Each structure stands twice: as structure tokens, then as C-alpha cells.
Image: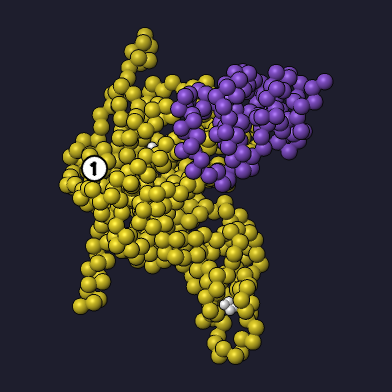
Chain colours: A yellow, B purple
């Protein structure tokens, strides 16, 4: 009799409190989620010194391809360029003569980069090629190369670090090889949507690392995530390595998709299978400190990067990764549906985060609270705060 | 004569003007500004045409689509957006449309 197998429900038990007790259980101060002073410290302590996800290799497909990315939190403009040797490099988008922003275009292809001011010209690997009347400077071209920024690629994703102490791969440990197996590693293109929000970057980010809110904020769009046995749709497990963290999303055995959802996700899953994208990462979420996470679900694999724009303002960039062109109508349909349905859910998140920020910014609260199943939020705060405290000590030491 | 859409899809012709919209962001915007009646009327007819339409269109390369094929494709892509409202959000759609306005689509393999 198959009866037993077909009716047996896998039981669900949430991650026990003991396993995340090492993160602490105390209330967390509220000021870091709105204070301008704290934000100023974070800029140096966190963002200047961390690996930041700035792009995907598919954006730089051939020698000469470039993209310009503004990193507002560091007041930096970054040029990512694929050199003649096929190597992707990052530079400050700053002419070494007198600082003019070199490239204005958001993306394109170039043989070299010529400064609009006095026409210093740089190669795609950052060397100064020529400068009018250069003899009058008494400089060598070598000392005038574009300032490079450390760059590493993992899982097809491009990361930069303005003041690296440790390589990305070393910092990621076991997560590095694992990320190489995510769909983004094989992606050749992506869909993207972007939002700005009146929300601190941590408050915004935290929304996406707890499931406690799902049933309340996504009652109609997120029904698949909750059920009687797991009413909050909590994850199956959490994992940590240094400042980075993972969760394994619970698979609801009782999902009832709507008719078009069934068609679209069915097709998406078929394509993912055929493309070799289905795999053990399918329910995995990987968060890389400070502001990036990616979800492996093959038919709707997406990343989300949250850029601070100020103590109470951020920008979210969401990308859904695709392998191969739209080679047929069904694939195009499945991708359109995947984008539209993810965007519906994220729109709901954005609205409630802003409400949270309004409350926090009033200064009414000294503390906020994280429960056991908000462990990832606590882990982010702990890691940010550790760095901010260390940086404060560094500043105090320097002043003494 | 049915020049607007490929043979077999005449039932969708009344919806061409409103829903054969090129571009993912434009389709999302059209959903956002549409009325519940418009969405339900379109969904009611189009939902059963989705699989036949995809089966027909899958028989061709996207580059080989003629104008009628492109209209049919764009309508089915609009249906993806509309179905999220009709099947999912129901009467929450107007409030939701306001929240969605902030989520700007900047890239899509189907063209923005
Ligand atoms: S500032 Fe660029 S050439 Fe002078
Ligand atoms: Fe959410």
C-alpha cells in the first residue's frame, strides 16, 4: 500500500533556541537603525572594509566591456572593466590628473578611456596611455595609473573591496565553493528591478532574513511559504561562517499553486532541470556580509543587494538569474512570470519596512527585540556592531 | 479576416489594443493602471489560450515571429502580470499597485 507514503507529512520542528544561543538573547539597541553618527561609523568600519557585490560577469562579456557603478555609501564611483586579456578589473572612476570622473556612461564598450577635462587617456587595464604635454608634469606614466580596487569573482558574481584585509574566498570559507554551484554561477543574463526606500540598510536587509513576517505581510502572495505544521514558514536550519550566514528554506509539501503559477513555475522548473540548474542548493539562502544575499531556487534564483544611501535611506537591487537566451516563447513567459511574482512580494516588504523606519526614527525605542527565528538579524547586528566598536577603538587609539 | 493575431486566437482580438504591450516594465505598468473589470475580462478569455498560444509560438524561433506572433506573445506576457492580480491579490490589487510603483523594472530578457 502506498497510502502511508503518500499521506505521511514530514514533521517540522523549528531550529532550537540552544543552537543560536551563542548569538546572545539580549535586546538590541535601536539607535544603530537610524542614528547618523552610527551610520558614519559603519561607512568606514563596515563598507570600506568588506567585500561588496557590484555586478555579474555577464555584464562584462568581452574585452573592452565596462560598467560604472556608484557606491554612494563610500562616495565612490567604480569602473569595472574587462581588459584585452579577458581579465575583469575594478578601478576608481577617477582621472589621476586632477580627479575628474573619467567615464560618464553607465555601461558600454571602449578601447580606452579618455578624460573629458585634459584628455588623459587610460587603457582598459588602467595604465596611463597618453596625456597631452605630459613632459611638463615631470611624472612617469607608471605613477599615473588608475587607482585599482581589489576584485574577486565567486559564483559569477563580482565583488570589490576598498581596503581588503583578507581575500573573499578565504573569508567565505566553505561558502565559496558552495556559491559556485548556485544558478548565478552559470547565468548569462538576468532580470532586474530596483527600489529606493526610506529605511536603514540593516532594517531593510533584516526583513529578508526572517520569515516571522511572511503570513502577515504576504497573506496572498506568499501562501506557499506557510502551513499548519509550520505556521510561520520558519527555515529548516541556519548556518554561519564568520560574518556570513545561510538558511535552508522549508519546503511546504502542501502548496496549492494558482493555475498560472502552476503553469509558469512548472515550465521554469523544467527549463532549470534541462539546463542543469536544479540541485542541492534549491532551498538555500546565502547571505554575504554586509549587504548581499542570494537564493538558489532554480526557477527563480535571485540575489538582493541593499545599498545604504543614508542613515534612513537605502536602495535595493534584485536580480533574477537566467542561463541562456530566451530561446522560445515558453521560456520567455516563465521568466516574465518569475520576475512579476517576485516583484509583487518585494513590493509588500518595502511598504512595511518604511513603516518600521518611521517608528524607529522617532527615537521612541531604546531597544528592539529579536526572537530565536530572527537569529540571522541578530547575527548581522552583532557583526556590524563588532566592527563599529573596533573602529571606534582604533580612532580613540589614534587620537590618544 | 484576422490579421491581428495568428489563426485560432481570434477570441483574443478585442484585447489586443489594451494588452499587446511590448516591454516588461510597460506591461507591469499597464496592469497597475487597469481596472478590475478590464483585468477579469482579459484573464477570463486569455487563461485558456495560454497553453495553446505557447505551444503555437514555441514552434517558431522568437526572431522569426511576425507582427501577429509578437502581439500574441506580448499578450501572454501581459497575462502573467494580470494573473497575479486576478488569481492572487483579488481586491487587494489597488493598494498593491501603489506599493509596486516603487519597484522599478530595469532589466528583462524580454526587453524593459
Ligand atoms: S582631470 Fe583628467 S585630464 Fe585633467
Ligand atoms: Fe517578505
Label 1 resides on the chain identified as: A
* Quadrant housing the C terminus of chain B: top right
In the rendered image, the vertical position of residue A277 relative to residue A260, given as above or below: below
Dot 1 surroundings within 10 Å: few (below 14), some, or many (20 or more)? some
> Which residue corresponds to the image point at 64% horizontal and 69% vertical from the top-left?
A112
Q: Return the residue nearer the eye: A26 or A8.
A: A26
Report whether residue B91 is seen: yes
Q: Position of residue B7 (x, y in %)?
A: 76, 21
Tell me the SS state at disc 1: loop
Q: Residue B109 is drawn in which quadrant? A: top right
Q: Is residue A364 left or right of residue A111?
A: left
Q: Position of residue B45 (x, y in %)?
A: 63, 18
Q: Is residue A210 left or right of residue B70?
A: left
Q: Return the residue nearer the eye: A190 or A239.
A: A190
> What residue would you read off at disc 1?
A370
Q: Residue A95 is drawn in which quadrant? A: bottom right
* Quadrant housing the N terminus of chain B: top right
Q: Is residue A197 left or right of residue A36?
A: right
Which residue ends up furthest to the top in the rendered image? A1
Q: Return the residue nearer the eye: A228 or A104.
A: A104
In the rendered image, the vertical position of residue A111 relative to residue A234, given as above or below: below
Task: Please count the marks in the image.
Answer: 1
Q: Position of residue A129 (x, y in %)?
A: 62, 77
Beta carbon of the mark 1 residue lies under 8 A of ligand 2:
no
Ligand 1 located in image quadrant = bottom right
In the rendered image, the vertical position of residue A135 relative to residue B66, given as above or below: below
> Which residue corresponds to the image point at 47% horizontal and 24% vertical from the top-left?
B91
Q: Position of residue A251 (x, y in %)?
A: 37, 29
> Which residue corresponds to the image point at 75% horizontal and 24% vertical from the top-left?
B6
Report whether residue A331 is seen: no
> Which residue corresponds to the image point at 49% horizontal and 73% vertical from the top-left?
A147
Amino acid at each position: 500500500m502506498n497510502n502511508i507514503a503518500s499521506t505521511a507529512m514530514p514533521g517540522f520542528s523549528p531550529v532550537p533556541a540552544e543552537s543560536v544561543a551563542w548569538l546572545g538573547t539580549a535586546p538590541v539597541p535601536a539607535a544603530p537603525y537610524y542614528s547618523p553618527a552610527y551610520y558614519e561609523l559603519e561607512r568606514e568600519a563596515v563598507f570600506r572594509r568588506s567585500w561588496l557585490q557590484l555586478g555579474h560577469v555577464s555584464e562584462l562579456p568581452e574585452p573592452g566591456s565596462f560598467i560604472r557603478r556608484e557606491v554612494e555609501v563610500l562616495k565612490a564611483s567604480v569602473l569595472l572593466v574587462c581588459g584585452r586579456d579577458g581579465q575583469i578589473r575594478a578601478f576608481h572612476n577617477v582621472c589621476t590628473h586632477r580627479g575628474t570622473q573619467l567615464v560618464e556612461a553607465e555601461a558600454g564598450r571602449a578601447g580606452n578611456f579618455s578624460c573629458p577635462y585634459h584628455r588623459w587617456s587610460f587603457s582598459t587595464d588602467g595604465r596611463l596611455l597618453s596625456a597631452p604635454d605630459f613632459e611638463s608634469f615631470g611624472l612617469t606614466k607608471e605613477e599615473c595609473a588608475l587607482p585599482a580596487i581589489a576584485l574577486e569573482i565567486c559564483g559569477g558574481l563580482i565583488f570589490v573591496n576598498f581596503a581588503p584585509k583578507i581575500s573573499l574566498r578565504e573569508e567565505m570559507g566553505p561558502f565559496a565553493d558552495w556559491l559556485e554551484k548556485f544558478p548565478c554561477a552559470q547565468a548569462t543574463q538576468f532580470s532586474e528591478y530596483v527600489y529606493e526606500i526610506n529605511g536603514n540598510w540593516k532594517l531593510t536587509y533584516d526583513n529578508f532574513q526572517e520569515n516571522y513576517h511572511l503570513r502577515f505581510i504576504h497573506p496572498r502572495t506568499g501562501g506557499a511559504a506557510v502551513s499548519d505544521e509550520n505556521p510561520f514558514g520558519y527555515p529548516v536550519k541556519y548556518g554561519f561562517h564568520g560574518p556570513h550566514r545561510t538558511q535552508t528554506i522549508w519546503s511546504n509539501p502542501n502548496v496549492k499553486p494558482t493555475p498560472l503559477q502552476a503553469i509558469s513555475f512548472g515550465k521554469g522548473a523544467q527549463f532549470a532541470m534541462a539546463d542543469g540548474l536544479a540541485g542541492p542548493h534549491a532551498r538555500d539562502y546565502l547571505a554575504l556580509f554586509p549587504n548581499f544575499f542570494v537564493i538558489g531556487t532554480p526557477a527563480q534564483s535571485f540575489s538582493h543587494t541593499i545599498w545604504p544611501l543614508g542613515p534612513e535611506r537605502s536602495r535595493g537591487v534584485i536580480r533574477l538569474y537566467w542561463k541562456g537566451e530566451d530561446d522560445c516563447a515558453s521560456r520567455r513567459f516563465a521568466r516574465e512570470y518569475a520576475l512579476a511574482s517576485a516583484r509583487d512580494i518585494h513590493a509588500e516588504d518595502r511598504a512595511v519596512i518604511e513603516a518600521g523606519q518611521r517608528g524607529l526614527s522617532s527615537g521612541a525605542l531604546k531597544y528592539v527585540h529579536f526572537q530565536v527565528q530572527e537569529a540571522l538579524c541578530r547575527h548581522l547586528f552583532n557583526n556590524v556592531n563588532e566592527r563599529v566598536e573596533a573602529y571606534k577603538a582604533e580612532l580613540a587609539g589614534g587620537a590618544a | 479576416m484576422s490579421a491581428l493575431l495568428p489563426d485560432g486566437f481570434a477570441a483574443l482580438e478585442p484585447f489586443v489594443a489594451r494588452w499587446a504591450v511590448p516591454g516588461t516594465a510597460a506591461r507591469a505598468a499597464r496592469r497597475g493602471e487597469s481596472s478590475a473589470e478590464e483585468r477579469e475580462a482579459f484573464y477570463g478569455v486569455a487563461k485558456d489560450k495560454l497553453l495553446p498560444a505557447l505551444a503555437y509560438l514555441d514552434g517558431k524561433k522568437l526572431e522569426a515571429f511576425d507582427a501577429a506572433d509578437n502581439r500574441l506573445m506580448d499578450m501572454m506576457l501581459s497575462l502573467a502580470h494580470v494573473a497575479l492580480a486576478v488569481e492572487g491579490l483579488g481586491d487587494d490589487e489597488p493598494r498593491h499597485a501603489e506599493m509596486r510603483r516603487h519597484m522599478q523594472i530595469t532589466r528583462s530578457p524580454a526587453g524593459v
